[in-house]
Amino acid sequence: MRAARPAVRAAVGACLAVIGLLMPAAATAQTRQELVWAGDSEGGAPYVEADPARPDRMIGFEVEIADLLARGLGRTPRFINITFASIAQSIARGDADLGLNGIEDTPANRTALAATVPYYRFREVLSVRTADTQRYRSLADLQGRRVATLGGTVAYEILLAAAREHGVVPVSFDDDTHPYTDLVVGRVDAVLLDNVLAERMLKKVHGFAVQPSSIAVGHYVGVLAPGNTALRARIDDLMREAMRDGSLERILRKWNIWNEDQTALHRQVLAGETIPPTVGSDGVVAATMSGLEAARRYLPSLLQASMVTIVLSCLSMGLAVGVGVLIATGRVYGSRVVRLALTAYVELIRGTPILLQLFVLYYGIAEAIRLPAFVAALLGLALNYAAYESEIYRSALEAISVGQLEAARTLGLTERQVLTLVRGPQAFRLALAPMTNDFVALLKDSSLVSVLTVLELTKQTQIFATNLGSWVIPGSICAGLYLLMSLPLSALARRLERRWRTPTA
């Protein structure tokens, strides 16, 4: 049996080597047979959503366009779900052949990717509360008011220009649903988004209206990797054929998004007319300038976002320390009921994602308590980290020897004096270094609050990268700023650890 083991290992190794040689060929063959396309099903109908009758199947007009293209290419369509803001980057790195999800024809997309011919014309429209339809007719009427949109879009760039010209306050969201729900409850005063999104939300959310005039006009395109021009040319031919024979019109009519704008667009595309990209303000500038020039332009906004990150992190950590100390003290000294309640809180917080906690604080309780975005972010981070901090403080309190506590009581000290004069100071020394490490972790976790429309460093970097069409320079600057903020804290943690390290027996 022992003699047979080397032979077995050799045989297994040979099989693995053969499999390794065959896998690339198999993957290539599968790629040739499939049209892998990327979209974000979170946005929902009419673009891409899970079929309510069959959640494992996607439906929407983008799905049917992808099916049409795959048939024309002789391939099988395969959908992969990618967050909307990351579709362009995923296409560029080869995760999918084609991106279809209401992707705007912008200078950045034309520069960084291979964009198809436009297949849908949309209009940027302003939505306001029903009671404000006469009050807010245009962006000029919204001076000092909060206007919501999706971050990294042409609509956001338009709002940035309106902020400079009219004093509008842009509010960036990560999805296209919550801007409208926040509009109805009064967190924002208007929403600027595509007419397709506005008309869809009118069927779901009541209490707002869409102004008839358009702020801007744009187009949806498919995007491919910059070197995939041969496939792009074939897809362009299929798009034109679908416009010519009415296949595309039938799809758009089926999803109730056909209008006269599409008739004009199809006529232009089939006539070979040049259709300019959708232009905001900052996007076209960033896409046409060099990376260093774009970095210089965006650096002030990144520094400002860094200040938001620092202030939010410091305030959250301060509150987390205070609440954590109270929880730890209650779990050590409290009654059985108090200990059970505090333990349940700690386990609940540690057992659920922080993103879920942030959503509950901001959206879940909005009907009862309407917290501002920054306050919700502050409370969310603080209450989450308080649970973890309390475990550090509890273990530090329990690490103090019973002999010291008994000696203090023998000297006549009350339990409060024992805690404040003997146990507490020593526990603080033990907890100080890990507490500082947690502050560094919280500094980085603060990037999660962008889901609550707080424009911190990571969110501002994402907007910069989308406008530029690349993550290289924005990501490098963002990493450098985080290092500048966290390295001093890390150095402080190491120094405190050396200073307060208890000598080994």
Image: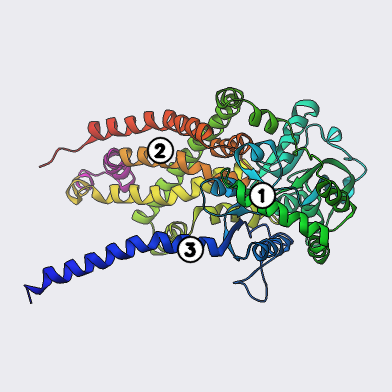
- 427 in the magenta segment: yes
The Cα atoms of the two marked residues, 2 and 1, are separated by 49 Å
Image quarter in which the N terminus is found: bottom left
For the residue pair 380 and 280, the one nearer the viewer reads as 280
- 261 in the magenta segment: no
Q: Is residue 396 above or below residue 257?
A: above
Does the image show residue 339? no
Task: Residue 222: give x, y in percent of width and height.
Answer: 67, 50
Task: Residue 321: give x, y in percent of width and height.
Answer: 43, 42
Q: Residue at x 58, y 52 (%)?
A: 83
> Quick check: 200 left or right of 135?
left
Residue indicated by mark 1: 233
Mark 3 or mark 2: which comes first in sequence? 3
Could you tell me the amino acid type at mark 3?
Ala
Q: Residue furthest right?
A: 134
Residue indicated by mark 3: 29
Task: Residue 136: give x, y in percent of width and height.
Answer: 87, 40
Mark 3 or mark 1: which comes first in sequence? 3
> Quick check: 456 left or right of 384?
right
The Cα atoms of the two marked residues, 3 and 2, are separated by 47 Å
Q: Nearer the viewer, mark 2 or mark 1?
A: 1
Task: Tell me the number on the disc at residue 440.
Answer: 2
- Image: magenta residue range: 408-431
Task: Tell me the number on the disc at residue 169.
Answer: none
Q: Is residue 66 above or below residue 276?
A: below
Could you tell me the amino acid type at mark 1?
Ala
Element at label 2: helix
Q: Residue at x 32, y 30 (%)?
A: 491
The Cα atoms of the two marked residues, 3 and 1, are separated by 21 Å
Q: Residue at x 63, y 60 (%)?
A: 41
Mark 2 or mark 1: which comes first in sequence? 1
